[in-house]
Amino acid sequence: MAKNGSRKSQATITAGRRSAGAAAKLKSPRLKNSTKTARSVSTEPTAVAAPGEVQSKRLVSEKAERFTESVIREMTRQAQFYGAMNLAQGFPDFPAPAELKRAAQQAIENDVNQYAITWGAKNLRNAIARQAKAWQGMEVDPEKNITVCCGSTEAMIASLLAVTNPGDEIISFEPYYENYGPDAILSGARPRFVSLRPPADPAGEWTFDEGELRRAFNRHTKAIIVNTPNNPTGKVFTRRELQLIADLCQQHNALAITDEIYEHILYDGAEHISMASLEGMSERTITINGISKTYSVTGWRVGWAIAPAAVSDAIRKVHDFLTVGAPAPLQQAGAAALALPAGYYQALAEAYRKRRDRLVPVLDEVGFRCFRPRGAYYVMTDIGAFGFENDLKFTKYLVKEIGVAVVPGSSFYNDPRDGAQQVRFAFCKRNETLDAAAARLRKLRIPK
Ligand code: PLP
């Protein structure tokens, strides 16, 4: 049955025990006098505070109290603290392509220092449109359909803020990339979840129940978020699955927001299909992507949203007031990245396949049950054999005593119990890192 988001995840979406404590310590902020401008937005009339009201005012928003900091990013800090191998956060520890670095250097040398056009430098938007056509046959107008953002992270939250109204529901498959939960809360929407079920045979595919998906859609559904290839499961949605989702979106007049950031990282002959390339879907799909993963530059913060013109207008406005624009010289490097030849992408996928096939057998050998990814660069595992009460305890033990940082499974679920016997490994690392992690993991013991 579709869950309605009322039970909050211990890991990410939580009542703010920590935050409430932190809020108590905050000093009163220095409030600036607001300056009215010709474009000021409408405000409520100023209310006169009752005695005592000023002191009891909550200085932290109710929204911000409903989720914690990212567990994934926290695991990177723990890896640094304990000197552990970081197989937690999804960033490569190997160099970016030389062509990109040269293009970024050149752009700075050429004094590309000022704001780009707020929705993205023209040559980058042209390159994005060209690639969308070449890879997915999508007709994208770079003048109307594209908003370049600070990473696909901003593209997602800007999109959600641009399309949701109070009372709207956003469906996500779970386990889900942890940002989607807070994203839904920040945009004021109600998250709903549809389970992705692990395969009985670890070499099989994660699947969802068609009935559960159908029941999740209703008159409040504004959008469904689909992440394919998927983090954390490695699932690559099939054409049949995407068609079912597309049919439901059309039937319920809902949007599809697809996070396709791992589009080029595919294994075992899996094929990436963009939702927007399906019949009738370009009018109701926001396609999110970026250069972070495909070109190994997660810190450069260049991503984008491709959307129908009217939706694009709304995304552009939100984006403008969130960040104005993505880093201008790195947008130039992004344009150079998108001009790399097709062979680059084949080599990328093949290099990741080798890394997957280097790590997964070790994990199998030491007692993890690995669900074989068909795409992206993570492997979700079952830790039942190790006899730990939950994923948080196991993860703590792993980072502190064994020296390997991973992500606790519960951070990918609305109800932490659903991920209590899972952890996620990232294998976007050098062979040396994977081998060092393997040597440490071999110290793990399965209780007799
Ligand atoms: N979407 C997914 C599914 C991810 O796994 C990640 C990073 O791990 C992101 C988005 C973040 O992308 P970006 O660096 O473009 O903000």
Image (tube, helix red, strand yellow):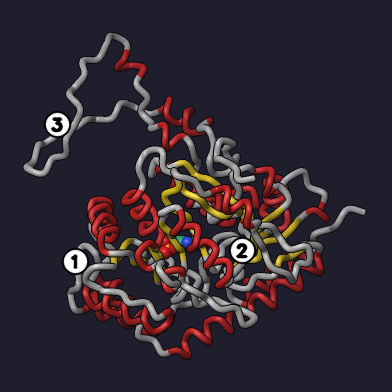
- Give the residue at mark 1: 117
Quarter of image, res 79: bottom right
Give coordinates of residue 271: x percent, y percent: 56, 78
Earlier sequence position, callout 3 versus callout 2: 3
Would you say 110 lies left or right of 234 here?
left
- Residue drawn 41% across the image and 38% down it: 167
Mark 1 vs mark 2: give the one in front. 1
- Mark 1 to mark 2 CA distance (whole Å): 37 Å
Give coordinates of residue 329: x percent, y percent: 26, 72
Would you say 71 lies left or right of 138 here?
right
Earlier sequence position, callout 1 versus callout 3: 3
Q: Secondary structure at mark 1?
A: loop
- Give the residue at mark 3: 33
Give coordinates of residue 419: x percent, y percent: 67, 49
- Mark 3 to mark 2 CA distance (whole Å): 47 Å
- Mark 1 to mark 3 CA distance (whole Å): 30 Å
